[in-house]
Image (cartoon, rainbow, N blue to C red):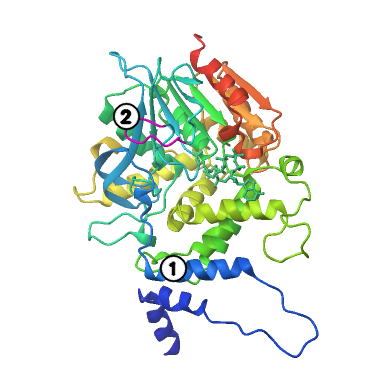
Amino acid sequence: MLRTSLSLLRRHPALPRVLSARLHTHHPRLSGGSNPPMDFPCIDKLETRQRDLLSGPEPTYDKIVTGYQTYTHPSFTCDHGGQLTKMRIAYETWGQLNAQKSNGILIHTGLSGSSHARSHELNKSPGWWEKFIGPGLAIDTNKFFVICTNVIGGCYGSTGPSSLDESGARYATTFPLLTVNDMVRAQFHLMDHLGIHKLHASVGASMGGMQSLCAAALHSERVGRLVSISACARSHPYSIALRFAQRQALMADPNFNRGHYYDGVQPHVGMKLARSIATVTYRSGPEWELRFGRRRQKPDQPPALCPDFLIETYLDHQSERFCLQYDANSLLYVSKAMDMFDISHSVTQRLERQRAEKQRACTSVCMDASEQPASEEGHSGVETGDEIMADLVRGVRNAMQPTLVLGVQSDILFPVRQQKEIADILRRAGNTRVTYYELDAMYGHDTFLIDVVNVGAAIKGHLENSD
Ligand SMILES: CC(=O)SCCNC(=O)CCNC(=O)[C@H](O)C(C)(C)COP(=O)(O)OP(=O)(O)OC[C@H]1O[C@@H](n2cnc3c(N)ncnc32)[C@H](O)[C@@H]1OP(=O)(O)O
Ligand SMILES: N[C@@H](CCO)C(=O)O
């Protein structure tokens, strides 16, 4: 009985506010001991923020990025069987599409990226690849028509958990599970809408590299060149563990409310913890050694439990900023899609089979004629290392495009052995035009966002090479 009431209460939209109100309880200083209590300015700050949020409107993330266009596809069946009616994709473009419509380059984003890869007239703020895209730059807008989308599942204009479903309510965690393949299939609906049958290239880093590989392997006739940076052919357990820890931290926030938090204060504290963990995986120890060393923010003060070392204030700053800019449910869905990514033939076949079953069960309302799955083949029950490799090789057997695989030696999240694996499976599949390039940069996984000189030069060389 008590259990039922609690679970009913948990679903009550007002509950997150009630729980967060608890955070504002004044904690009296203990008296009687001989030592003064520690100060917790970081907790004071969180409490003040939560209190302020109680009285103000919550952020709507699709307004954080502006100036994008949208394409709405009538109906979309996801690999795990979920349905999205009126699936919206937010996108931005730079440069001119040529008369043959053959100079398109599709840029795929990492986990939290928006379509705003570069500034333009409708949004003059710098994009996340501002220094890579533009006239004469690595992705030269004098030559190419560049397209970038917000992935489905995201929160910057594309359909995601914070979007309204067909009943007019937010999807929240009724949003269907997604795969990287879903994200890419959605993007090709946009390419159809733009009249682009074949891209000059598919380019991506991190989760964007997963998408890029998926595009080249599963839509091979539509992709002229492949660029995969700091990505993988399948997520390895260490990266899954690191994202699992982030999701656990996020879901432990009392305001998470199983994802139904849109009417209340959002789980910013959990998001902040999650992003702190993520940031540790995005950069590198050697970089932080050089940048921050063991320096403390206030060396003349006694050590503190709140951010104290410069590396701590850095993590605090990065995670504080992020937790107010990205939707928690998007983090859950998109990071889970990354965990599940595996370009193996048997996995692709299983996903296509699931989708086909769903489509067969569907009424004409959810049927999408352009999404007929490929013919089914059996799952081989993969087990040994050789079989895993053979399954991966089979998964990319159609990806014969000139390919650049770029890895960074200081990347702990997508280590270079995974970059070698991508190059290896492509070559074993028969692709004779794979260029493998390993950067000795110190910025870790996020090098692709920072090292415009080396990463940019490698991309430019590959995109403009005439082979
Ligand atoms: C790829 C995609 O698809 S998308 C998403 C890309 N964007 C993100 O990941 C957003 C988060 N941003 C970042 O991770 C980084 O800023 C990057 C990777 C974009 C750029 O890296 P860098 O140029 O090395 O910037 P850096 O990591 O030093 O961050 C700079 C910020 O940290 C602050 N900072 C630096 N050192 C400290 C410190 N010790 N204590 C507190 N703050 C610090 C700076 O003041 C600056 O703050 P501001 O951005 O609010 O002005
Ligand atoms: N730092 C980037 C890359 C992560 O894969 C992001 O937040 O999207």
Reading the image, the residue beneath label 1 is 52
Ligand 2 occupies quarter: top right
Task: Examine the residues drawn in magenta and state their main secondary structure.
Answer: loop
Identify residue type, mark 1. Asp
Q: Which residue is mark 2?
A: 191
Measure the alpha-carbon separation of dots 1 and 2.
43 Å
Q: Secondary structure at mark 2?
A: helix
* Residue 450: mark: none
Q: Position of residue 61 (x, y in %)?
A: 38, 52
Q: Which residues are magenta?
A: 119-127
Picture quadrant where residue 420 is located: top right
Front residue of this view, candidates 83 and 25: 25
Q: Residue at x 40, y 51 (%)?
A: 80
Q: In front here: 427 or 37?
A: 37
Magenta region includes residue 414 = no
Residue 307 visible to the viewer: yes
At x 35%, y 49%, the residue is 62
Q: Residue 398 location, x and y as percent?
A: 47, 25
Please tell me in which quadrant of the rendered image residue 274 appears. Answer: bottom right
Q: Would residue 66 appear left or right of 440 to someone viewing this image? A: left
Bin the neighbour count of mark 2 within 10 Å (Cα to Cα): few under 14, some 14-19, many 20 and up: some
Q: Secondary structure at mark 1?
A: helix
- Front in this rendered view, residue 238 or 38: 38
Is residue 237 visible in the rendered image? The answer is no
